[in-house]
Structure formats: C-alpha cells, structure tokens
Image (cartoon, rainbow, N blue to C red):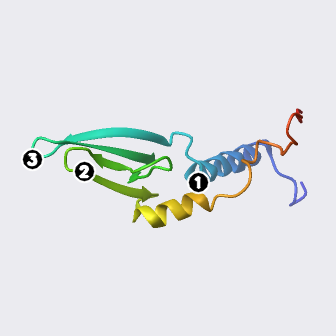
Amino acid sequence: MNKYQTTKEQKEEALAEEIHNIKKWVNPKGKTRRVSKIEEDGSKTIALALQMGDRTVFHSEEGPALINKEQKRKEYYLNGIEYTFDDWNEIMKGKEGLPWYKKAAAKGQTHRN
C-alpha cells in the first residue's frame, strides 16, 4: 500500500475530526433572548442578551439592550461592550451596503437568481 493512500477508516476519522473542529467555531444554536428582572425598588428591567454557546452577552442592534422605563435608564451594548448612545448610533450608521444575500438593483427593476 502506498503511504499516501488512506483507508476508509482514516477518511472517516479525519472527517469526524474536521466536523468537531468546525463545530467549535460555528454555533448554530446562538439565540437572542429577552430576559427581565424585578429590581429592589419594584421596577422592571428588560435585557436583550445574545447567547453564543457557553457565553451570554448583552447585545442589541435595534436599540438599547438594557431598558428600565421607571428609572428612565437605557444602556446600549454590542457584543457585551457598553457604548454611549452617540457612539452606538455612530457604529450603527457606519454599516455600509447591502447584506450578502441581496443584489443592488435600480428602482423599479429586480435581479432575481
């Protein structure tokens, strides 16, 4: 047998190892959760959290990630990092272009696959 030929068992073992390594980096079970907590003064705080595998962080691209209406408190987070409203707004405005799955089209035209 040639030293560069692989057996079926070796191919299956290599494939299993590759799948294991991919699962470390890609977590299809990432979820956005809306959780709430009753504070000591009786007000309710709502938090938007992004759960990525074994790690959960505050995250919201639509608005504040922590909201307490009675205390008039709003905190802005992206991937667990707290920002002021101005910084958060600047980051959100800095997004450019279309998502990868859309194509640019002139008004009134469609580009379908």
**Which of the two discs, 2 and 1, labels the residue nearer the N terminus?**
1
75 lies left or right of 98 = left
Q: Which residue is mark 2?
A: 72
Tell me, yes or no, whether the two marked residues, 3 and 1, touch with CB atoms within 8 Å: no
Residue type at numbered disc 2: Lys
Residue 31, can we see it?
yes
Mark 3 → mark 2, Cα distance in angstroms: 15 Å
Secondary structure at badge 3 equals: loop
Residue type at numbered disc 1: Trp
> Could you say where residue 100 lies in the image, as x and y percent from the top left?
75, 48
Tell me, yes or no, whether the two marked residues, 3 and 2, touch with CB atoms within 8 Å: no
Mark 3 or mark 2, which is nearer to you?
2
> Could you say where residue 70 lies in the image, as x and y percent from the top left?
20, 44
Report the residue at 65% width, 46% height from top. Answer: 19
Mark 2 or mark 1, which is nearer to you?
2
In this rendered view, identify the residue nearer to me: 29 or 57. 57
Residue 83, can we see it?
no
Quarter placement of the N terminus: bottom right
Quarter placement of the C terminus: top right
In this rendered view, identify the residue nearer to me: 102 or 52. 102
**Which of the two discs, 3 and 1, labels the residue nearer the N terminus?**
1
Mark 2 → mark 1, Cα distance in angstroms: 38 Å
21 lies left or right of 5 = left
Q: Which residue is mark 3?
A: 40
Q: Which residue is mark 1?
A: 25
Report the residue at 39% width, 51% height from top. Answer: 64
Instruction: Identify the residue at the far front of this view.
Output: 107
> Could you say where residue 101 lies in the image, as x and y percent from the top left?
76, 42
In this rendered view, identify the residue nearer to me: 5 or 58. 58
60 lies left or right of 11 = left
Tag 3: Cα neighbours inside 10 Å, few (<14), some, or many (≥20)?
few
